[in-house]
Image: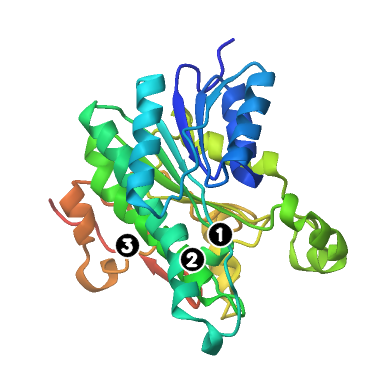
Amino acid sequence: MPGRLHGKTALITGGGRGIGRGIALRFAQEGAAVAIVQRDEPSARATVDAVVAAGGIAIAPGGTDVSVPEQVARAVSTTIAHFGTIDILINNAGIAGANGPFLDVTFSAWQRIIDVNLSGMFLCGQAVARHMVEHAIRGRIVNVGSVNSFAAEREAAAYVAAKHGVLGLTQAMAIDLASYGITVNCLAPGPITVERNAAMFASLQEQIGTGVPLGRPGTIEEAAAAALFLASDEASFVTGATLSRSTGRGPAVYAARPDRHRVLRALRGPRGPGFGDARLRRDSGRGVGHCRSHARYGLNRCCRSMRLPYRPSVSRMPQSVSIHAPSPPAW
């Protein structure tokens, strides 16, 4: 039986290690040919060897720094020359960079993290999307964010800013590319055990058990399964959405008022979409927070411009809950 990505070609940035490597292996298992883009070329080659050893098809287009436009263009053109097309982009490359107190962060450290974690996604997304549009490919783009796309943490200003930017970039891309049949979504993993943090997570089992409702960090395979869904035909009506692999600690659980959970529970059920993976919505590009103008104008202007049907919505912002359900406008 053919896999869920049979006949597709996927370009995966940061595919040499961690979550990116896991996505490459899973996509190849599901029938996709994969191009592994990694600055560290030996890591890319190692992933290619693992895919091929498992019976898959893979190439490494050479060492690529996603923050350098010329190197991105070369990786994309090499992949197209080898496979003939690109159907899926996994925008996964990122760095933690030099973290420290906000007052001590140098501009060069700030710039490097923004260049790789945000500008790199723009460059790769634009290059691949142009190919998709030119060849009428109804493609899939998945930008990998983080739980830091929704909430900050200490001594990580540049990283948090970049990951917040990934969320906004995803929604902007989704709206601009929707008319071409290209979907753009964000995967925002919570704590995932990878090579570089395995020892640290092992030493923090008690804290993780207390802070994460499921009592454990996620696995690379679980993150890859989420990416597979967003890249597959099963997600053909999902765009501008964020799938938070957060083991229950999604954006909706930041409660500032005691009535917040009662409102969400009434709307979505005890453990429905209001919790954990709250931002995955089959809404054709209307991201969370876009419908706040309903209360003032009775009409979502972005919905009118996209000719989307009116539907009441809940704005799930960290500090408050707003329910907007006025009478539908007479269009």
Secondary structure, mark 2, is helix
For the rendered model, the colour scheme is: rainbow
Looking at the rendering, which quadrant does residue 200 occupy?
A: bottom right
Residue pointed to by mark 3: 290
Q: Earlier in the sequence, mark 1 or mark 2?
A: 1
Measured from the top left, where is residue 90 in percent x and y?
47, 41
Which labelled disc corresponds to residue 95? 1
Secondary structure, mark 1, is loop
In this view, the residue farthest toward the bottom is 103
Which labelled disc corresponds to residue 113? 2
Which kind of residue does numbered mark 2 sit on?
A: Ile
- Left or right: residue 113 versus residue 30 is left
Q: What separation in Å lies between label 1 and label 3 (alpha carbons)?
A: 30 Å
- Left or right: residue 307 versus residue 50 is left
Q: Answer few, some or many: residues within 10 Å of disc 3's Cα (few below 14, many 20 plus, some between 14 and 19).
A: some
Q: Can residue 62 be seen in the rendering of this structure?
A: yes
Looking at the picture, does residue 138 appear above or below residue 7?
below
Secondary structure, mark 3, is loop
Q: Are marks 2 and 3 in contact (CB under 8 Å)?
A: no
Q: Answer few, some or many: residues within 10 Å of disc 1's Cα (few below 14, many 20 plus, some between 14 and 19).
A: some
Q: Earlier in the sequence, mark 2 or mark 3?
A: 2
